[in-house]
Image: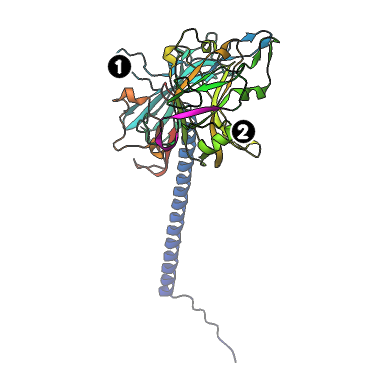
Amino acid sequence: MIRRVSKAGFTLMELMVYMGIVGIVVVIAGEAFSNSTKFRVRTDNMIKANQEAENVAMLFKDDVEQLGTKSSKESGIVTVGSVNYGDKFGAVHASVYMDPNNIDNTKKDSSSFLIKTENNFSNLTFRRLRYDDNGHYAATEEINWYVDEVTLKRTCKLIDKKDGLTVDGNDPCSDVDREVKPVDMATQVTKFNVVPAKPSAKTDEVQIFPFDGSTSFRMVSRETMSDYVRFKTTNLSNEENHGGAGAIFSSFFSNYDNLNESIRSTPEQMKNQAFAIKDETTTETNWKKLCTDYGRLTLKKDQEYEISFEVTYPGSTTDKSLLFVPGTDHMSVGFRSISTGNIPAHDGVNLIDDFLFFPPMSVTGSGTRRMRFHVPRDVNNVCLSFTFALYSPLVSQGTITIKNLKLNKVASSDYSFSNPPFDAESNKTEKKNVKALRLELQVSRGAKNGGKGETGDVLLVIPIQSNGPRD
């Protein structure tokens, strides 16, 4: 039997149905591809915006953290006998302050920053010192961060410099009296706000020494020496073994051997070391026992603390302490482990080093010394201590007086931001007490037709501990 082969194809109706189905599939696939592409572009823009915002914020933080740095180690070789002691610690460079010499006390500005608002963006200007490779003063820099249309820019210029300092074309700062050179830091910036924290001259603090909120303390010497050569600690009435609102250190052991013109060994510094305990009258003389019973402290990890005390000008212009040479002679405050007598350490690394301080060389140098710190881990069983190492001739015959010694926990509210924000420019005399700035930064990518596009946002609080003349 012969089989016929049909030559019939798709009917017109079948073809139209097929084409319709294919068209629907193509439209759906095209829409999916388009949406996928848009999503990928938006994701890329978002990542780029976040990365740029974070990078710029870190550059801003590194810049602003140095705001107000004002002291330097200056050249000035000190020689006693045949011994060369090297550089001396220099005075504060007042050029970092915005306007401290204004005759009108209500307009004086002893801070190191200025914030204005221009076109809904902040314009921040601040000052800091530049140092050479030896830590000596080189110049005073004035830095400006601002937004020009939608571009965040930075400029730097020198407003003062050391004689002989040359500034070449590659220097990031323009020389004194030269035109500034703006550098673009970010484009498509939709928010740049710099907000000052509430002033914190009087912060919410918790006093942990002297204990129980007392204003009295007592100093006890580390070593008991002969009446001929001994380090002496008394209260303000020159009474030994008694405390009060202050302490007088005298009869220092000299760390320089004038007879042999040589420096004594480091352990000799322990003879000029004293420990702070509560104002307790006792015949006990062992410093470890006294610290354990009346001065033992515990410092908690990451808690911020502040040591503060007043150093007063000597009662006599002939007091030998006025021969103190910064950078040569040494005065410090810190902590000592009650068990070892050394700076508290872990695995051979100091957990907190001593803080240097200097006696007043004039009446105007009298005032409160403040040292803030935190520790990387809990520190137990320590005692607050003062150490003196005096090398200059005769300075060991002087006296040092401190008053109102305190160790405080600093509350986190120290960096609080009010709403509305603290108006720094209307309160110039309080600006010097601002201890932090808050950065609010937003960068956009992929904006079209006036829209924002995808944004990257950063909110960052930056401590500025060097702002103000008392820091």
Confirm whether the magenta stretch covers residue 230: no
Q: Quadrant of residue 362?
A: top left
Amino acid type at image mark 1: Asn
Name which residue type carries label 2. Gly
Q: Residue furthest bottom?
A: 1
Q: Counting residues from the N terminus, which is met first, the one under dot 1 or under dot 2?
A: 1
Q: Residues within 10 Å of mark 1 (few under 14, many from 20)?
A: few
Q: Nearer the viewer, residue 218 or 178?
A: 218
What is the number of callouts on the image?
A: 2
Quarter location, residue 132:
top right
**Residue found at x 62% / y 25%:** 270
Residue at which label 2 appears = 341
From the top left corner, tell me how far across and down residue 120 is, in percent.
31, 33
Q: Where does the image place residue 382, in percent across and percent down from the top left?
A: 55, 36
Span of residues in magenta: 209-221
Q: Which quadrant is the N terminus positioned in?
A: bottom right
Left or right of 377, for residue 411: left
Q: Which residue is mark 1?
A: 105
Is residue 376 in view from this perspective? no
Rate crowding at label 2 as few (under 14), some (14 to 19) or many (20 or more) other CA atoms within 10 Å: some
Residue 106, compared with residue 195, is above or below; it is above
* Up-down relation of residue 160 to residue 442 (above or below): above
Q: Determine the residue positioned at 31% across, 25% down.
A: 425
Q: Secondary structure at mark 1?
A: loop
Left or right for 359, reference 120? right
